Every structure is written in structure tokens, then in C-alpha cells.
Amino acid sequence: MKQHPLTARQMGLIRCHTCGKLAFDVGHDGYEEHCPRCQAHMHMRATNSLSRTWALLITATILYIPANILPIMTVTYFGSGQPDTIMSGVITLLQHGSYPVAAVIFIASILVPVLKMVALLILLLSVQLKWVLDDRQRTRMYRAVELVGRWSMLDMFVIALLVALVNFGSIAQIVSGPGATAFGSVVVLTMLAATTFDARLIWDKEVIDD
Amino acid sequence: MSAKDNIQSLPSIPENWIACKDCDLLLERVEAPLGDKALCPRCANPLYQPREQSVERTLALALTGLLLFIPANLLPVMTLDLVGQESSTTIYEGSLVLFREGLYWTALLVFFASVVIPLCKLLLMLFVSGYLQLQRSSPLLPYAFRYYHYLDEWGMLEVYMLSVLVAVVKLKGMASVIPGIGLYCFIALLLVTTLMSSLLDQDDFWTRIEHGLKGQPQ
């Protein structure tokens, strides 16, 4: 592949974030430029990318607390049962010897959200404070965050299935709890945070250095 | 160069110029062999991946997916047998029950990610690849394909599939679980939609949409 020494921005070109079409940057006088191919709004960089990502990430972090403290569901079996949080659900599975499933839930519901929030925090801080880190690694980290985020929805679907299936009145019943709402919001907010973060900001400092 | 009045005097951008999505590096497009991924030399982001007969194949898969969508959603995914009492559920019932319990936000989230968005994606893909296959043009094509792009990551059938397996394991100590026909249709639907997104050549689609519209008399 032949490589131009420049970025699109340095050539005065905008890449449409939706379809990839290149267009000349003519939008400096305050009107919205539309992509000539797909009609999407074009921006040199995502608008207020850092502030928006910060806002979404902070909200997600706050909601992460009730998501883990409040019960996500209550299983009542022959009259006895107690509310389960995400963590206690994993522990229960471990006690029953279902190690693979416990591992899946632990990864999808605990490990992935935490790592995702930490990764976004590192990306935001490193761009804002101009830390000198490996840009390629950071881009790779960003793509990993984008890819794995959706798998955290796993627990939400499990709750929906269990609540719909286990409905035997006094014998056995599963009721969902408020923790599920908080957790679902965390997943959506972190997915949105990954979308609003513009990975090109990682590389932009070279433009400033010039 | 940035003044709006000077648009006329701007040189045209060479057709084979592309920029990397994640690092904005300006590159010259080279023909990659079918199925090969072109990677950005600076950040290793996949740039494009030419696919063979992308339009025909995605059209066929979108049609198959829509046919499978009906039984996969209306027939029971699994049936639970607890001391002679039976209970079964379909995919959309899961979110319906959450809605009745008052967890509206959770219910909507599950309903959208497992039913509405996968359906919209199939319909949009049928529309776009159908029009491209018939070599017809519509002013709606760019919008339809754009929304397909936006919805892409919010359809979560594969996550749902894994959650079915988890639910089965969680329930196995409590009652006997019988898989339903809906589950088999759902697995087929998942395979078809996964294949559809992996055989989709986004770049080729956009080029066809663009050129189709240009060729159309206004």
C-alpha cells in the first residue's frame, strides 16, 4: 500500500464517519456539511467527543454502584429464596459446580464492564493530558472496547428468559429486581461512550506538533 | 481552500483516496484479493474487505433471515417442566413479562436488542440489496444503508443465544428443560444473520449506491 505522509485532516479533507467518503472541509462558517454520498452530518472530528464521552462514562460509573448492590432478581423455590445480586449469582453458580457458566457470567457482567470503563478512562485521560503512550496499542484497546461491550447484555437476556419461564406461582417464581435496570443502563451508557469517543484524537497530537 | 465560495475551484478528490477510520491516515486504495482484509499500515485498523457477489449473497441471506424470523419469535424457545406443570416462553414474551413487572426500561432494552433491531436490520438489508440487485435506484437507499450501519452493533442475537445456554444451565437443577422448535429456528436465524454481516462488503455497497444515484436522471 502506497502511503501518503499526511492525514486527511492535514489535506483539508473530512472522512464521513458513516460511509467513509472523503470530502473537502468547507463547513467552517457554522453550517452543517452533509456527506455527498450518504447525507450524514460530517465533522472533522466527532463533536465534543471528549466531553460527551466523559459525561457518559461518569454516569455509567455512578450507576455501576446500584447495579452491583441492588438485587437483579429474586428466585423463590418452594417458598424460600433470597434476592440475588450479580456477584452473589456468580457465587451461587460456583457453589453448584457450574464453573463454565459462572466464568461466562463473571466475564460478561463483572470483568468486561470494569475493564471497559477503565480502558475508556485511560483513553480519555491520555488524550486530554497528552500522555506519551503507544498509539497503536491505544487504538487496539479502543477497538477491543467497541467489540466486547455488547456481550455484557448477556445477564439482561438471562433475566428476561428466567422471569418469563419460571412462573409457577407458589412452587417457584423468579422476579426481576431494580439492579437489572441499573446494570442495563451501565451497558448502554458504556456502549454509547465507546461510540462517542473519536479514536482519531489519539493520533491528532502529531498535527499539533507540526 | 476552506471558503465556501471557492468550492468551484477545488480540485476533485481522486477516487482511490481513502482515510483510515481510526487514525485519519490518508491512503491510496489498492485492489485487495477477494476475502482479504486491507489493514491500515499505521494503526492496523481493517480498512476494507472485498467480498465476492456481496449483493446477491446478502439479499439471499436477508430473505432467509426474514423467513426464519417469524417461527424463531413466535414458537417457544424452551419449555420448563416442574412437577408436572409446564411453562414455555418465546423470545418476545421475555420482554413482555418484564414490562408487566414494571421494569419498562429493561423490557424495552431487551425487546429492542433481541427483536426490533434484528428485524429492522433484515428489512433494511432486504431493501438495499434488493434494489442494488435489480439495479434500481431510490433516493432512500443511502438513508436505509446508513441506518443499517447505525443499528448494526445494537442487534444482539448472538448474545441472546449465549444467554439461552446460561439460562438452561441455571434451571437444570430446578426443573427439566425441553428445547422448543423456536430454539432451532433461532439458531438458524443467528447463523444466517452472522453470515450476512460477514459477507457484506460495505465499501462495495456504498460505491454502488453512489454510482447508481449518479446514473439516475433527476
Image: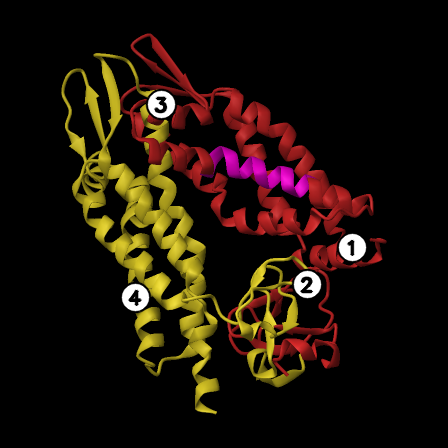
Chain colours: A yellow, B red
- Comparing A59 with A179, the one in front is A59
Query: For the point 67% across and 79% down, which residue is it?
Result: A1
Q: Are marks 2 and 3 on the same chain?
A: no
Q: Secondary structure at mark 2?
A: loop
Which image quadrant is residue A144 in?
Answer: bottom left
Whether residue B123 is in magenta: the answer is yes
Identify residue type, mark 2.
Answer: Pro
Which image quadrant is residue A121 in?
Answer: bottom left
Using the image, tell me which numbered label, if any, was put on residue B97.
3
- Comparing B104 with A40, the one in front is A40
Residue receiving disc 2: A36
Q: Name the chain letter of the residue that bears numbered label 1.
A: B
Whether residue B179 is in magenta: the answer is no
Task: Tell me the crowding category of disc 3: few under 14, some 14 to 19, or many 20 or more residues within 10 angstroms, Cα based.
Answer: many
Query: For the point 58% across and 33% down, which residue is it?
Result: B188
Residue receiving disc 1: B213
